DNA sequence: TGTTTATATAAAGATTGACATATATTTCCG
DNA sequence: CGGAAATATATGTCAATCTTTATATAAACA
């Protein structure tokens, strides 16, 4: 459990608030207060999520006086990108024969409670 | 809430078992039983996770007799790839000025319970 | 030193989510 | 038709997680 794997990164990004935090950090480092006010989330909430993100290796912190500047680390995103590479064939439509069989229906998608039966 | 967004996809992939299922499906469609035995997860468990994946739009189903063949849909992965595009600059080290300031430390990373103070 | 600002942690309640066991449904086959 | 195979659902339980409120720490400042 040294390096954060894509699997655990998914868990970090699965939370709505955390994802919004990460997207704010995409353009550069931010303080806790800046995040809290810009996201209209209470400060302890932001702190807690930042702690989780930090423990998960997604962000780093830099202290300057009383303020803490959080920013994204690149490694986990690099790992995510690497993980996605295995799905490039799927993404670009190049499927194995087995996959192609069902990929060709290409019909519209509609989620349903029942995988089948219901239209 | 129509199309599965990256955000919700992260939630789907956050679960260990579901991620393993998805990775099996990467090479083509599989039946529930095949997944259950190959992953050593009980069949109801696999069915349940497949239902969640289906409701989330990550997989489709094809019925053939008593068996159901599950396979990956490409759209959510395409969306994921698209989402990652916004992080390409970060991944490749091209950061905004603000980001670069902290990116340059490039020191080793070590998760800790306390974001600071510790070491 | 006392007060304000910025951030972290604690505690408690509510919600969600996973897992295992048992059972129902559908299809195949003799 | 009756049994077996494949898959889905229901239920009860347990653990993890999020949210809020209150409080603690730590630095800045007057």
Image: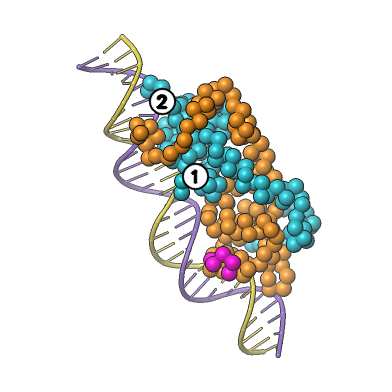
Chain colours: A cyan, B orange, C purple, D yellow
- The answer to which image quadrant residue D23 occupies is top left
Judge whether C23 appears above or below A52 on screen.
below
- The answer to which image quadrant residue A50 occupies is top left
Residue at 40% from the left image edge and 34% from the top image edge: B115
Mark 1 to mark 2 CA distance (whole Å): 24 Å
Dot 1: within a 10 Å radius of its alpha carbon, few (fewer than 14), some, or many (20 or more) residues?
some
- Image-based side of B78 in relation to A30, left or right: right
x and y percentages locating residue A28 in the rendered image:
55, 26
Checking the image for residue B18, the label placed there is none
Q: What residue does disc 2 label? A: A63
x and y percentages locating residue B68 in the rendered image:
68, 67
x and y percentages locating residue D22 in the rendered image:
30, 35
Name the residue nearer the viewer: A95 or B92: B92
Does residue A29 appear in the picture of this structure? no
Tell me the chain of label 1: A
Residue at 57% from the left image edge and 60% from the top image edge: B49
CB atoms at circles 1 and 2 under 8 Å apart? no
Please name the predominant secondary structure of the magenta segment in the image: helix
Name the residue nearer the viewer: D20 or A55: A55
Residue at 54% from the left image edge and 49% from the top image edge: A7
Judge whether C9 appears above or below A107 on screen.
above
Task: Kindly report which numbered mark, 1 or 2, lies closer to the viewer in this rendering.
Answer: 1
Q: What residue does disc 1 label? A: A3
Quadrant, the C terminus of chain A:
bottom right
Start-end of magenta stretch: B37-41
- Image-based side of B113 in relation to A109, left or right: left
* Mark 1 or mark 2, earlier in chain: 1
Dot 2: within a 10 Å radius of its alpha carbon, few (fewer than 14), some, or many (20 or more) residues?
few
- The answer to which image quadrant residue B31 occupies is bottom right
Residue at 43% from the left image edge and 40% from the top image edge: B111
Tell me the chain of label 2: A
């Amino acid at each position: 459990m040294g390096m954060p794997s894509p699997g655990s990164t998914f868990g970090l990004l699965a939370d709505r608030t955390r994802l919004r935090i990460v997207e704010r950090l995409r353009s550069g480092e931010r303080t806790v207060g800046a995040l809290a006010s810009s996201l209209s989330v209470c400060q302890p909430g932001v702190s807690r999520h930042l702690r989780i993100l930090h423990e998960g290796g997604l962000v780093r912190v830099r202290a300057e006086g009383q303020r803490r500047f959080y920013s994204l680390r690149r490694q986990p995103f690099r790992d995510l990108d690497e993980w996605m590479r295995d799905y490039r064939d799927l993404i670009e439509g190049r499927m194995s024969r087995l996959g192609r069989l069902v990929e060709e229906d290409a019909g519209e998608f509609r989620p349903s409670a029942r995988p089948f039966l219901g239209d």
